[in-house]
Image: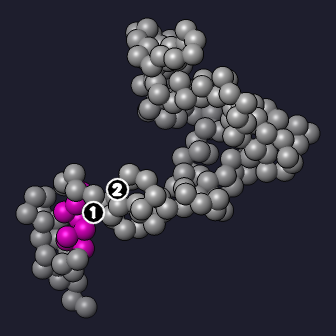
Amino acid sequence: HTGEKPFTCNICNCKFKQLAHLKQHKLTHSQERPWACHVCKYKAKAKKHLVSHLKVHTEEKPFMCDLCSFTCSSSVNLSSHKLSHSDTKLFKCDMCGYSSNFKKNLSMHILKHTGVKTFHCDLCDYKAVCAQHLKSHMISHSEERPFSCKLCDHRTKTNSLLKKHFKKHLK
């Protein structure tokens, strides 16, 4: 227990006590993802990330937001979700008053200013700036109600409708 770190990364010069830790670290410099999910095409750089990912294929969602009905399979996702309840928005649009706690939301918002909508519905004239918006739209063409309340048997077509319903339980 001398604190010696004999293993050095040849790319960034980080030092490690164990060779295994150096090998894991080197993956951060590459596109290699050796840990593959057996259910979907997800691949991870670290085994712990795969283990965490596998929970998305189960109904196990032990982490619950104390402000809404959101549940998830990891504490990281819950922490990220809780930002959505914060009044302090970190990312602001230079063209209007929009702001968000998520960089990806700001990037999607900026597409609204450009008018570029590359995702098209095959069943109507709807066009979207991202695949997720089109996917959400497609539910409007079906009888599917994939969002279910954890407190009663009510089901909705969208997460926003579920949140609106959930607020009734809080009154």
Provide residue 145's location: percent of width, then percent of height. Answer: 73, 36
Query: SS for tag 2?
Result: strand
Q: In the displayed structure, does residue 95 sit left or right of residue 28? A: right
Q: In the displayed structure, does residue 41 sit left or right of residue 139? A: left
Q: In which quadrant is the N terminus drawn?
A: bottom left
Q: Give the residue at mark 2.
A: 43
Res. 100 visible in picture: no
Query: SS for tag 1?
Result: loop
12 drawn magenta: no
23 drawn magenta: yes
Residue at (59, 45) in percent of width and height = 81
Q: Name the amino acid type tagged 2.
A: Lys
* Residue 164 badge: none
Residue at (69, 40) in percent of width and height = 146
Residue at (55, 29) in percent of width and height = 135
Mark 1 vs 2: CB contact within 8 A: yes
Provide residue 102's location: percent of width, then percent of height. Answer: 49, 35
